[in-house]
Amino acid sequence: MGDPKRPRKTYETPRHPWKADRLVDELRLLGEYGLRNKRELWRAQAILRKYRKIARSLFVLTGEERMKRESELIRTLAKYGLISENATADDVLKLTVRDVLERRLQTVVYRRGLARTIHHARQLIVHSHVAIGDQIVEVPGYMVKKDEEGAIRLLVEAKAAPP
């Protein structure tokens, strides 16, 4: 079963550690989305990899089983706002890691204008100044659902500088 204090990894490291083009792309994404380390990026890539694998497995199925599983997958991804309700399995394969990173709480707080920078958004979240509805969320990597997006609010207003 494993030690409960040591949870299973939720990411997979790259196979080749020193490819220059991958390192540059990763560094650019880290800065653009305000990620703390590459582990957060690898976690987003793992989420994307999981849904793409499910979509690829649908292509071998036929009939009603495929329709059922495809609609279930589409419903799940539409709930997170990654694709539209009337999308297909081909649209799931077109998703990129940027689409997943855009749904993180840190990015949503910044894009809605609640924080001045992406790093400021992360600090507000970690310091318990952001709530979704009545629930305080302290995890910058929280995947925001489409219906929760309007309920995001700051608990404390930023203090104005003294005159």
Image (tube, grey):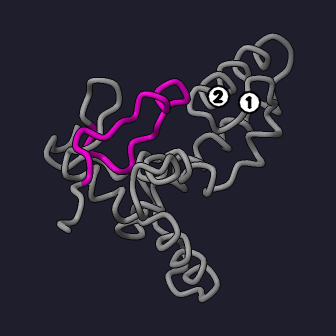
Amino acid carrying label 1: it is Ser
Closer-to-camera residue (111/106): 111
In the rendering, at what x and y percent does residue 64 appear? 81, 10
Most extreme residue toward the right is 63
Instruction: Determine contact: label 1, label 2, CB under 8 Å.
Output: yes
Q: What residue is at 61 percent from the left and 56 percent from the top?
A: 97
Q: Which residue is mark 1?
A: 84
Q: What residue is at 52 percent from the left and 51 percent from the top?
A: 111
Q: Which residue is mark 2?
A: 78
In the rendering, at what x and y percent does residue 115 appear? 39, 55
SS at mark 1 in the image: loop
The residue range painted magenta reads 137-158
Sequence-first tag of 1 and 2: 2
**Which of the 4 image quarters holds residue 133?**
top left
In the rendering, at what x and y percent does residue 27 appear? 51, 78
Residue 39 placement, left or right of 87? left
Above or below — where is 136 with respect to 71? below
Query: Badge 1, how many Cα within 10 Å: few under 14, some, many 20+?
Result: some
Amino acid carrying label 2: it is Ala
**Which of the 4 image quarters holds residue 72?**
top right
Residue 34 placement, left or right of 5? right
Closer-to-camera residue (28/148): 148
SS at mark 2 in the image: helix
The mark total stands at: 2
